[in-house]
Image (cartoon, rainbow, N blue to C red):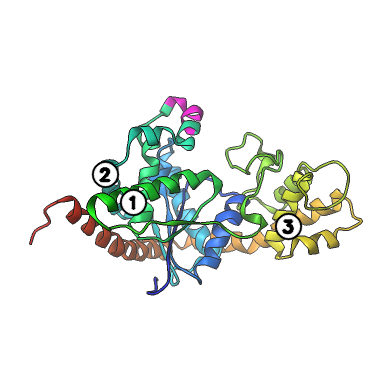
Amino acid sequence: MTEEGKKKLFSAVQPSGAVTIGNYIGAIKNFVTLQDEYDCIYAVADLHAITVRQDPAALRRNTLELMALFIACGIDPNKCILFVQSHVPAHCELTWVLNTIAYPGELSRMTQFKDKSAKHAENVNMGLMDYPVLMASDILLYQAALVPVGADQKQHLELTRDLAIRFNNRYSGTFTVPEGYIPKGNGARIMSLADPSRKMSKSDDNPNAFITMSDDRDTIIRKCKRAVTDSGNEVRFAEDKPGVSNLIAIYTAFTGKTIEETEREFAGKGYGDFKLAVGEAVADALAPVQAEKARLCKDKGYLNQVMKEGAEAASRIARKTLSKVYRKVGFYQGE
């Protein structure tokens, strides 16, 4: 579980369907490395997922599968706290308190709220607006010093910091003010295979634009072969070659090779050879993960035990913070 003396780090992933290799390279792969360096707390963020309409049966299945994927990728429940967000009621309880110091204006200005409101115009709900406050609660409950954050979540982390400082100023020091942890390496942001100017996303209308962690070998290789490249035929990482640079980022992430090694390996070879090699590298790396995930999904007893123990460990930390918050705001809790 967690260790004293290490900085606490919190992160969560929504169980809202297929996980792309962009999610894996940018987040989950880093989670595995970080668990040896920090006191890590990782969650399956099912409370966040329902801000967009979900099929209940699919959400339950996706929650179990994401937990299995975490473990199959190398996240060790014995090294970190691994739990399902809704299993720890303190997340919702702290959100209510933080709502009283969060302002409608700052929430309505959030880029993600505006984007999702436009995309889901038929379901612009208060949960969608309140999403950043729940995210702040996720982080502040555990006194996390560090939060791995991508470009699309920086604004939410800033709000988290603002709420922590605002509460601390009003009620005296209570929360750790978290810092963003920017993952190192070129694989931190994987772009669309169809349009390298956009981030890879499972919600892309073009299924060839992304690779999921469950795609089979033939599908992976086919998608890589169809990936958009650039003029010329030189395999080189450069600003004027976004398509090839994206494929190089994917290749280095899955092989462990450097950009320079990759450029040398494919010197004098065309895009066709390179794209085939990228597809094979991704498929080879994902095969054991897919096999382990399938095995774990059949062992629901084990996954349920991991979730139960993780929720208990998370709750012990969360209740300690929440009790302090309740005392600060004046809630009577007995003598």
Q: Secondary structure at mark 3?
A: helix
Label 1 or label 3, whichever lies nearer to me, is 1
Cβ–Cβ under 8 Å for marks 1 and 3 = no
Quickly name the residue at label 3. Answer: 251
Quickly name the residue at label 1. Answer: 165
Query: Mark 1 to mark 3: distance in Å?
Result: 41 Å
Q: Is residue 16 above or below residue 217?
A: above
**Residue at the (30%, 63%) spot, across then down:** 317
- Looking at the picture, tell me which residue is in the foreground, 319 or 20: 319
**Residue at the (78%, 48%) spot, across then down:** 244
Q: In the rendered structure, does residue 120 fall within the stretch colored magenta?
A: yes
**Neighbour tally class for label 1: few under 14, some 14-19, many 20 plus, Cα within 10 Å:** some
Residue 168 in the image: x percent, y percent?
Answer: 28, 53
Residue at far front of view: 169
Disc nearer the start of the sequence (3/2):
2
Disc nearer the start of the sequence (1/2):
2
Q: In the rendered structure, does residue 197 fall within the stretch colored magenta?
A: no
